[in-house]
Amino acid sequence: MSSYARPEFLVETDWLADHLDDPNIRVFDCTTHLVPGSDHTLRAESALADYRAGHIPGAGYLDLQAELSAPAGTFRFTTPRAEDFAAAVGARGIGDDSRVVLYSTGAVSWATRVWWMLYAFGFENAAILNGGWQKWQAEARAVSEEDDCRYAPASFSAQARPGLIVDSGAVLAALDDRDAVVVNALARDQHEGTSERHYGRPGGITGSVCLPALDLLNDGDGRFLDADGLGQKFAQIGISVGMEEKVLAYCGGGVAATVDTFALALLGHDNAGIYDNSLSEWAKNHDLPMREGG
């Protein structure tokens, strides 16, 4: 069995338990709740109350929508400007020398979204807690209900890396590029347009393929598949990990897509990016092609 090319991007629960008191460790719950609305859309809600009800000892809470998204954006999870992102994470104690560990009490995509933004702004010393909160709880590890996060503000240097977070123009160009693959990380029924859940028009982007984020995780404990398993999943949709082909992932709002691109980063595939705002933007523009209803 082969190993990840970048194993430092994942940490296990036993490692974190042994390093919680390290002075440079910064642990954050990144959970957001999506609540179904009456119009087939989803409303984002903070999970701060859940964090207060129980979290990894000493961990902080990062609110993706309120703290780490563009404040005046048309869409709820638009990536902020580099200077705004640097100020936000620095205020929460993430500095250039920090070792950051991110987790979610729900879908791992909330943690990978924050990880991908850190990565896109030049920071590579962040990791996802493999198996997340569910695995931490299943192992009966310590849980805190106290306001015990004591991270002092720090200085974070944000340097945007081109191509890691892209717009609709880049996606259109990729659709016409034989050496690029556009990947939908949503469920297959959403990609095929048979789900009641959609973002204005059902279906996926014309010419894209589908690799649901959940397919990259073990069914039992929510941990990422091993390197061979991940490689096989990408090979099934025509992506040869380690080759030069460009991969652009999308979803509903640029969150689930980061599970796919994070997995590619684990495997050492450096030529990947996410479509910021994704179908929340694309589906509302009828000049942009979609394979509606399959």
Image (tube, helix red, strand yellow):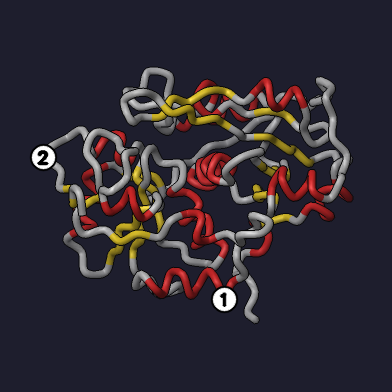
Above or below, 44 against 272 in this view is: above
Question: In the rendered image, which quarter contains the C terminus?
Answer: bottom left
Residue 155 or residue 6, whichever sits in front: 6
Point out residue 23 in the picture as x, y percentages from the top left corner: 85, 39
Q: Is residue 127 left or right of residue 173?
A: right
Residue 281, quarter of picture: top left
- Mark 1 vs mark 2: which is more N-terminal? 1
* Residue 47 in the figure: left or right of residue 258: right
| Residue shown at 51% from the left, 46% from the top | 116
Q: With 263 as the anchor, is 196 left or right in this view?
A: left
Q: Position of residue 248 (x, y in %)?
A: 34, 55
What amino acid type is highlighted by mark number 2? Asp
Q: Can you tell which quarter of the image residue 50 is in? A: top right
Q: Nearer the viewer, residue 185 or 125?
A: 185
Crowd rating for badge 1 (residues with CA inside 10 Å; few <14, some 14–19, many 20+): few
**Residue 247, relative to residue 234: is it above or below?**
above
| Residue 191: x %, y % from top left | 30, 52
CB contact under 8 Å: marks 1 and 2: no
Q: Is residue 71 above or below residue 1?
A: above
Q: Furthest-top residue in view? A: 72
Rendering quarter of residue 11: bottom right
Q: Which residue in the protein does label 2 denote?
A: 287
Label 1's element? helix
Disc 1: which residue? 228
Q: Secondary structure at mark 2?
A: loop
Residue drawn at x 76%, y 56% is 12
